[in-house]
Image (spheres, helix red, strand yellow):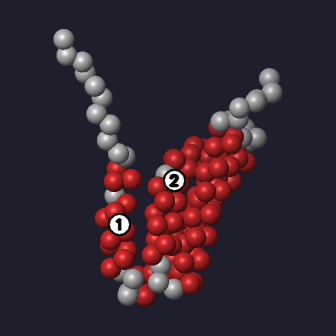
Amino acid sequence: MSVNRMVTRPPAVVASVPATSAALFFLRSHRSFWRALSVAALAIAATGLAAAISYLVARTAPAGSVLHTWSMYGVLRILVTPPFALGFFLSGLFAPNRSSRIALFVATAIEVVAFASIALVWFQPFRPH
């Protein structure tokens, strides 16, 4: 009698961390890369914050409104915040200068706040009925 066992594999995001870390380490000497990455990280984090706000505001909007439609797309953006937060945090650890490091950690914090605000709404343990 054979027993089928599930083979557990690490998620792709976790498996990519060593390769990404090596690439970021070798890119430390390129200042323009870190400047562009910092600006892009803050812009991406701003979209996550905007998506979270639109989702929270749309909960009180009527069902057929434009805001309600935009919040539907905001959910998709919120679902990708954990990989973005991990990438920004990892980049912040390897950033060569203080300004890039601060920008990347601020982007990480914005992504965490955006996801946590929505997660608290989705997974409220005690909803009043």
Q: Which secondary structure, mark 2?
A: helix
First in residue order: circle 2 vs circle 1: 1
Q: Residues within 10 Å of mark 1 (few under 14, many from 20)?
A: few
Q: Which quadrant would the C terminus be assigned to in this image?
A: top right
- Check contact, mark 2 vs mark 1: CB within 8 A: no
Q: Is residue 51 visible?
A: yes
In this rendering, position of residue 45 left or right of residue 95: right
Amino acid of disc 2:
Pro
Identify the residue position indicated by label 2 in the image.
82
In this rendering, position of residue 7 left or right of residue 108: left
Most extreme residue toward the right, as rendered?
Answer: 128
Location of residue 48 by image quarter = bottom right
Identify the residue position indicated by label 1 in the image.
20
For image coordinates 58% across by 76% down, the residue present is: 103
In this rendering, position of residue 40 left or right of residue 70: left
For image coordinates 68% across by 53% down, the residue present is: 53
Q: Position of residue 74 (x, y in %)?
A: 57, 49
Most extreme residue toward the front, as rendered?
Answer: 1
